[in-house]
Image: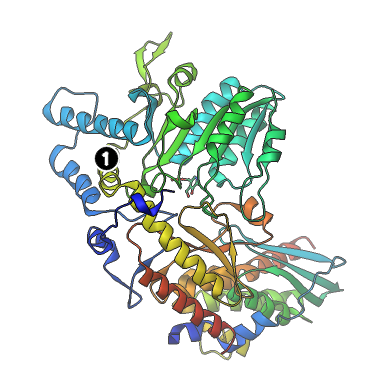
Amino acid sequence: MSSLAETRILNIEKIRDEFPVLHQLVNGKPLVYLDNAATSQKPKRVIKALTDFYECYNANIHRGIHTLAEKATKAYEETRLAMQQFIHAKHIEEIIFTRGVTESINLVAATYGRAFLKEGDEVIISGLEHHSNIVPWQIICDEKKASLKIIPITEIGEMDLDVYSKLLSSRTKIVAVNHASNSLGTINPIKEVITLAHNFGAVVLIDGAQSSAHLEIDVQDIDCDFYCISSHKMYGPTGTGILYGKKNLLERMPPYMGGGEMIKDVTFAKTTFNEIPYKFEAGTPNIADVIALHEAVNFIKELGKENIAAHESELLQYASEKLSNLPSVRLVGTSKNKVSVQSFVIEGIHHFDVGQMLDTRGIAVRTGHHCTQPLMERFGIEGTVRASFAVYNTKAEIDLLMEGLQRVISFMNNK
Amino acid sequence: MSGDLKKLYSEIIKAHNETPFHFEKRDSASHTIKAYNPICGDRFEIFIDNHPGKINEVHFHGFGCAISKASTSVLTKSLVGKMPDEAIALCSTFLDFINKKLPDNTLNLQDDFQAFIGVHDFPERYDCATLSWREMKKFLESNKKNQ
Ligand SMILES: Cc1ncc(COP(=O)(O)O)c(C=O)c1O
């Protein structure tokens, strides 16, 4: 994360005004939304882009010469350009719209994996992965009789790179890890992970679900082969996201789904496929949400990712310090290098009960295994309470969280 | 803390959560019933020792939220010494009570059933309260059929 010296202080109150959902009472208390790692709230401009589309120029894209269709197609393709710039991809056709990270990973597993994995090959993931970066690899490894290797996680929640470098071999064909962990917040040393994998000729997929709203992404600099993003985790609408893939790889990969848009020429004897990216965009896509995603990118760009990160890391530090001062609270995930996510457990009180009691005070946190069961097992726990922060959160909200937790602890201990 | 929460986490529930009834693993049990909720991760094992025709001993082990743990503890305690048919009837009564299917909730239910009345205000906790009871009822019914 950038140092404070070069960042601009953001006007958080003004930013909060952009988010209608934040200004409501939940169970009679002002909403304190601390579940941003699950999904972030949406600014007015994103919501407006959605209604504008449906009210003014709803049409199918790439298929008509009428005015509305042209306008819709142009707006859709402009988001592609915005996403190219957002992650510094070399070519615009390297940006494929999907439903989000889950679909992006499944796409790579089902096409690249199915075409290029052979019996005896190995796929490496880490112990920090979300189920969506585990299960697709299990499915394709099963099918191909390849094996799945796991980079172990240290006590503070970091990947053990020594073990990783020993796992790598000429059998390694794919490495898939996240940029930042959704359960612990750990920012992973992906550039190192990628360089090491490339030494063995393996391709690397990065799950960017938790990084896109917080970290600078430069796919050419890190030299990853695939990068996956979900719009809804970066102030954009649900139901869309991207897969970035290096052009030469995407061109060699077979298509994912068959249908309209992804074809060049169809006869019953033979079909030729469209060029990338359209080869991977079968059917009518999620046009409205893709178009609105552009506004989310603009929102982040105008605030400046480095300024967002500076504000969030201040919140994270404030929360972690306060939490660790609460008796019977244990932090889970204490790497120095984190996005604004803090998991914790309270001795003797189940996370579900904590979440329920906080909810009655209008505080939204996530409880459970966060779709990372193997990681929970690694720490010998069933789940955690997780507070995750976005640019619109404040220290005052963290104070309310602390007050709520104190009440939970004394209530359950009959004090 | 709001009144509703005090009702949800009643003193009886908190007591069962803190010192559950017969909370131990029994590898030698005649039957082990698993109750697992993949969504929240609650996971219990209930161990039954049968005497011919009768449930002799019941123990349980595992983890879950206060509501699910207390409800499993109450289940364990309630089944001791019961005939299978009585046990099935008890499960039905508890499940109907939580699901608001009893004609009158103030029926003379035992106190540790009544302790769960607060769940009625928190529909998202129905599953917590009923998890082990549902699995137990399923087990008892299929066990009866197989005999
Ligand atoms: C690290 C990580 N990977 C993948 C996903 C899946 O993203 P989506 O549900 O948007 O496809 C998530 C979302 O929870 C995540 O946090």
State the residue in front, A266 or A305. Answer: A305
**Residue at position x 26%, y 62% from top?**
A16
- Give x and y (percent) for residue A332: 59, 61
* Residue lying farthest to the front in this orientation: A5
Q: Considering only vertical position in the picture, is A88 above or below A301?
A: above
Compared with B5, A129 (above or below) is: above
Q: Position of residue A167 (x, y in %)?
A: 71, 34
Q: Which residue is tagged 1?
A: A294
Residue at point 38% right, 73% down? A362
Q: Image quadrant of residue A390?
A: bottom left
Q: Is residue B24 left or right of residue A127?
A: right
* Residue at 54%, 29% in the rendered image: A110
Residue B103 visible to an observer of this rendering: no
On the image, the x and y values in percent for residue A345 come to: 59, 68
- Quadrant of residue A120 within the rendered picture: top right
Q: How is the image coloured?
A: rainbow
Instruction: Decide: is B119 above or below B41.
Output: below
- Relative placement, left or right, of A386 versus A258 is right
**Is residue B5 visible from the viewing direction of this image?**
yes
Per the image, label 1 sits on a secondary structure element best described as helix
Residue at left offset 45%, top offset 44%? A209
Q: Quadrant location of the C terminus of chain A?
A: bottom right
Residue at the farthest top position: A269
Q: Amino acid at mark 1?
A: His
Q: Is residue A243 above or below residue A339?
A: above
**Residue A82 or A164: which is nearer the viewer?**
A164
Q: Chain of mark 1?
A: A
Residue A107, image x, y percentages: 49, 31
Q: Number of marks in the image?
A: 1
Q: In this rendered view, identify the residue nearer to me: A221 or A183.
A: A221
Using a 10 Å C-alpha cutoff, classify the residue at mark 1 as few (fewer than 14 neighbours), some (14 to 19) or many (20 or more). Answer: many
